[in-house]
């Protein structure tokens, strides 16, 4: 099947992170012919180093990448399946071609655990030209669009996590020296990716009360790096690491004891790591994001101390955060959290993937040739 995926980079890496991962899965695991049309190749190149930001046309990993801003995009014939990610509003001229070509047209919405999406998933929406565009909602159960999960990801993860030497070798590629990696099992390694609104100094205070050596890894631009010169000592190390390609990002999350993540793509990959995670949800007007966080915590259902930690991280509550860090990392609760994270990840992975559900719908609804 031929597929066009449109992506606009709004304010960070999540939109292109999701779109590139979806394009990869469809092209290399389902033999689809995929074109990815992106409006910001510079940001794209931060998470895929082979991208040439000045190139209007390039092919990487069997995927054709087009610069949205090029006139060439308006001249191409639409594919059989058009995917519009996160209401990115594709060009009118191209939209007219979609309708004429009778392509299957989906708009993928942002991930949420809210139950109402089960009633709207795959519902059609009439466009101004009386054509159907279908809503596709990623989600956590079989009544939704599911999550991106490559066929061998969990197996590959398990092999990697069972090999301490593989993890250490990988971490060295990020610039970590031997002194940090010595006695790896006696330290807590933490990847931290957050918004500026989070109580960073309080999480550091909480870590200090654990009386364990903590190694915090953060990418350039992450607000915690501003505190590195004040807090780096024998017990807490804050290390700047480079941006990496998506496969290496998975290895990074798999190598950690805990992942603090933000956005959609990082959140899902942290789930697949099977390691404890703390989600920093994107802030929205009237605190709508807290409702979304409630819904996810309801289904994630971690130990009570972890719930408090996640809420405090997102609501900037200092004292509860410090206390919940201590409780969540106590010997007994830490083991429970690790087991819970692994089990939840494994249970989620038993469901069919987003790519499979997407192609199945398109095949059935538009009576395409069998592709699955």
Image (cartoon, grey):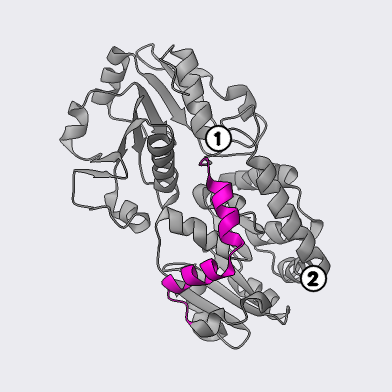
Circle 2: element type:
loop
Measured Cα–Cα span from mark 2 to mark 1: 35 Å
Using a 10 Å C-alpha cutoff, classify the residue at mark 2 as few (fewer than 14 neighbours), some (14 to 19) or many (20 or more).
few
Q: Is residue 157 magenta?
A: yes
- Give the residue furthest to the bottom: 234
Residue at 44% across / 54% down in the picture? 247
Q: Is residue 299 magenta?
A: no
Q: Pinpoint residue 26: horizontal percent, then vertical percent.
A: 41, 35
Q: Pinpoint residue 342: horizontal percent, then vertical percent.
A: 69, 53
Residue 218: tell me if it is visible. Answer: yes
Q: Which mark is residue 353?
A: 1
Circle 1: element type:
loop
Along the horizontal axis of the image, is 13 left or right of 156? left
Q: Pinpoint residue 25: horizontal percent, then vertical percent.
A: 43, 39
Residue at 54% across / 31% down in the picture? 137
Highlighted range, magenta: 150-177
Identify the residue under disc 2: 330
Q: Quadrant of residue 165?
A: bottom right
Residue at 52% across / 38% down in the picture? 110
Along the horizontal axis of the image, is 232 left or right of 186? left
Q: Quadrant of residue 113?
A: top right
Looking at the rendered image, the quarter that the N terminus falls into is top left
Q: Is residue 190 above or below residue 123?
A: below
Along the horizontal axis of the image, is 9 left or right of 117? left
Residue at 64% across / 26% down in the picture? 143
Q: Earlier in the sequence, mark 2 or mark 1?
A: 2
| Residue closest to the eye, 190 or 312 | 190
- Give the residue furthest to the right: 332
């Amino acid at each position: 099947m031929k597929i066009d995926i449109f992506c606009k980079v709004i304010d960070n890496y999540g939109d292109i992170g999701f779109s590139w991962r979806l394009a990869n899965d469809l092209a290399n695991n389902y033999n689809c012919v995929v074109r990815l049309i992106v409006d910001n190749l510079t940001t794209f190149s931060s998470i895929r180093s082979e991208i040439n930001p000045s190139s209007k046309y390039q092919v990487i990993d069997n995927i054709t990448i087009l610069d949205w801003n090029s006139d060439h995009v308006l001249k191409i014939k639409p594919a059989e399946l058009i995917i519009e990610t996160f209401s990115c509003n594709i060009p009118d001229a191209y939209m007219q071609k979609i309708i004429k070509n009778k392509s299957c047209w989906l708009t993928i919405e942002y991930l949420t655990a809210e139950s109402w999406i089960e009633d709207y998933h795959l519902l059609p929406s009439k466009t101004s030209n009386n054509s159907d565009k279908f809503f596709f909602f990623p989600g956590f159960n079989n009544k939704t669009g599911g999550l991106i999960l490559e066929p061998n990801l969990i197996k590959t993860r398990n092999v990697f996590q069972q090999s301490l030497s593989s993890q250490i070798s990988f971490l060295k590629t990020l610039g970590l020296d031997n002194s940090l990696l010595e006695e790896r099992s006696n330290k807590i390694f933490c990847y931290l990716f957050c918004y500026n609104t989070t109580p960073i100094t309080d999480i550091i205070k909480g870590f200090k009360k654990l009386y364990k050596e903590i190694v915090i890894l953060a990418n350039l631009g992450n607000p915690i790096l501003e505190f590195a010169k004040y807090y780096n000592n024998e017990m807490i190390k804050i290390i700047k690491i480079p941006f990496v390609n998506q496969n290496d990002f998975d290895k990074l999350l798999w190598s950690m004891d805990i992942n603090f993540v933000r956005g959609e793509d990082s959140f899902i990959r942290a789930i697949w790591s099977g390691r404890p995670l703390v989600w920093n949800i994107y802030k929205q007007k009237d605190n709508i994001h807290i409702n979304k966080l409630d819904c996810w915590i309801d289904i994630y259902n971690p130990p009570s101390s972890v719930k408090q930690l996640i809420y405090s991280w997102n609501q900037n509550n200092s004292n509860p955060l410090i206390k919940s860090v201590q409780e969540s990392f106590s010997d007994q609760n830490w083991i429970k959290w690790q087991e819970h994270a692994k089990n939840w990840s494994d249970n989620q992975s038993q469901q069919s993937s987003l790519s499979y559900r997407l192609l199945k719908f398109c095949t059935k609804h538009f009576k395409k040739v069998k592709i699955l």
